[in-house]
Amino acid sequence: MRKAFSMLELVFVIAILGILASIAIPKFSLTRGDAQSISIQSDLNQAISAIQRDVFVRNLMPSDIQGNYMIEVAGLSKSRWISVGNGIKLAKNGAIDTQNDCVVFEFVDGKNLHVQIAQVDTPLCQRLYKDYEEKIIPLFAQ
């Protein structure tokens, strides 16, 4: 009766594990990227709804709509979003994510929320650009 595996059996097992890993790792990275994209889209939609609701309920003035207000009202993660003037951008490590600086979400013209995805050559920005439409949401009639 044998008490150990032969070298040939070990080589075959390692080869099979290598093949499985080469298939699984790219799928995992695609799934992670898709999840990031969906999460950002969800954040944007949540922010739009929360800001519209708050402006209507509290009868806010256009001057009240700033980036910090947007993050606070929408309940966005400060580790993913950062306030920039009257808008917000994607953040990384407490600063603007320069690699994925493609999301523009801001209050413009004193009356509209504007969401725009720029076409930047990173996987996340490409997914967002392909999946998310530019939106202009009126908040105030003037």
Image (spheres, rainbow, N blue to C red):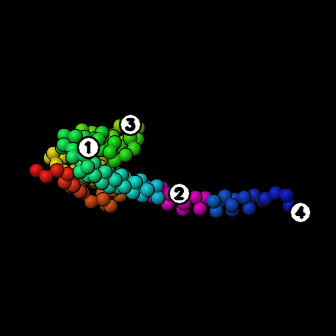
Q: Going from the N terminus, do you reach mark 1 or mark 3 first? A: 1
> Which residue does the numbered mark 2 point to in the structure image?
25
**Mark 2 to mark 3 CA distance (whole Å):** 29 Å
* Magenta highlight on residue 28: yes
Q: Is residue 106 visible?
A: no
Per the image, label 2 sits on a secondary structure element best described as: helix
Question: Where, by quadrant of the figure, is residue 5 drawn?
Answer: bottom right
Disc 4 crowd, CA 10 A, few/some/many (<14, 14-19, 20+)? few
Q: Which residue is mark 4?
A: 1
Find the distance from the CA under tag 4 to the CA under tag 3: 62 Å
| Label 3 environment density (alpha carbons within 10 Å; few <14, some 14–19, many ≥20) | few
Range of residues picked out in magenta = 18-30
**Residue that label 1 marks:** 87
Q: Is residue 48 left or right of residue 22?
A: left
State the SS at label 3: loop
Pointer 1 local density, CA inside 10 Å: few below 14, some 14–19, many at least 20: many
Q: CA distance from mark 1 to mark 3?
A: 16 Å
Identify residue type, mark 3: Gly
> Upstream in the sequence, badge 2 or badge 4?
4
Q: Residues within 10 Å of mark 2 (few under 14, many from 20)?
A: few
Q: Amino acid under label 1?
A: Gly
Kindly give the residue lying farthest to the left in the view shown.
Answer: 142
Instruction: Give residue 94's mark.
Output: 3
